[in-house]
């Protein structure tokens, strides 16, 4: 099975030695996305809901670059620095996955890159 990196200017440039996503056969593995504005390279201001919105937009850009959309997502992992943000994050998340609900894990963590409140990674299948 061959794999290739997926890159798009519509999502933030990686802040480390990794690809935005990797397409391996029929599966796309999206690296964790935080609420970085791809135009400025800076973390957006705002609460967990606002950061979830931006992180999911970044995931969407990577999906589109691979010819996929949110309906192709089969698994997500959410990392929250405050588990009390769970409800507000869910409210935003539900709008993006209203037609199909992928499997999901949510993990509370001590800190995230750039001081983000939320990080979201996704696996999608063609």
Image (tube, grey):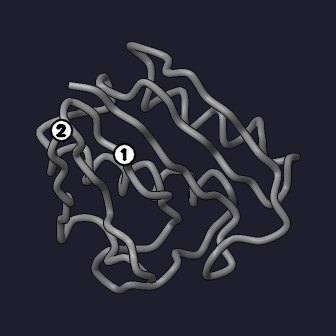
Rendered position, 103 above or below 14: above
Q: Is residue 122 left or right of residue 82?
A: left
On the image, the x and y values in percent for residue 25 come to 19, 35
Q: In the image, which disc is placed on residue 13?
A: none
Q: Quadrant of the C terminus?
A: top left
On the image, the x and y values in percent for residue 55 come to 47, 56
Q: Secondary structure at mark 2?
A: loop
Q: Secondary structure at mark 1?
A: strand
User: How far apart, in angstroms, are the residues tagged by discs 2 and 1?
Assistant: 14 Å
Question: Which quarter of the picture shows residue 113?
Answer: bottom right
- Outermost top residue: 99
Disc 1 designates what residue? Answer: 29
Task: Tell which tag, 2 or 1, sits nearer the viewer.
Answer: 2
- Judge by depth and name the residue closer to the eye, 24 or 76: 24
On the image, the x and y values in percent for residue 21 come to 31, 56
Q: Residue at x 27, y 53 (%)?
A: 22
Q: Residues within 10 Å of mark 1 (few under 14, many from 20)?
A: many
Q: Residue at x 70, y 64 (%)?
A: 117
Q: Is residue 85 left or right of residue 28?
A: right
Question: Which quarter of the picture shows residue 4?
Answer: bottom left
On the image, the x and y values in percent for residue 52 come to 56, 52
Q: Residue at x 40, y 80 (%)?
A: 17
Question: Which quarter of the picture shows residue 68?
Answer: top left
**Which callout, 2 or 1, points at the residue further toward the start of the chain?**
2
Q: Is residue 112 left or right of residue 28?
A: right
How many numbered marks appear?
2
Q: Residues within 10 Å of mark 2 (few under 14, many from 20)?
A: few
Q: Residue at x 44, y 48 (%)?
A: 56
- Judge by depth and name the residue closer to the eye, 30 or 33: 30
Disc 2 designates what residue? Answer: 1
């Amino acid at each position: 099975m061959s794999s290739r990196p997926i890159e798009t200017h519509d999502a933030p440039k990686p802040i480390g030695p990794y690809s935005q996503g990797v397409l391996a056969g029929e599966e796309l593995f999206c690296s964790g996305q935080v609420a970085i504005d791809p135009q400025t390279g800076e973390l957006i201001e705002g609460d967990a809901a606002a950061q979830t919105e931006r992180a999911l937009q970044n995931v969407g850009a990577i999906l589109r670059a691979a010819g996929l959309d949110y309906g192709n997502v089969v698994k997500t992992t959410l990392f929250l620095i405050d588990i009390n943000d769970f409800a507000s994050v869910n409210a935003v998340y539900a709008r993006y996955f209203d037609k199909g609900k992928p499997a999901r894990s949510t993990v509370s963590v001590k800190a995230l890159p750039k001081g983000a409140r939320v990080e979201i990674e996704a696996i999608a299948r063609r």
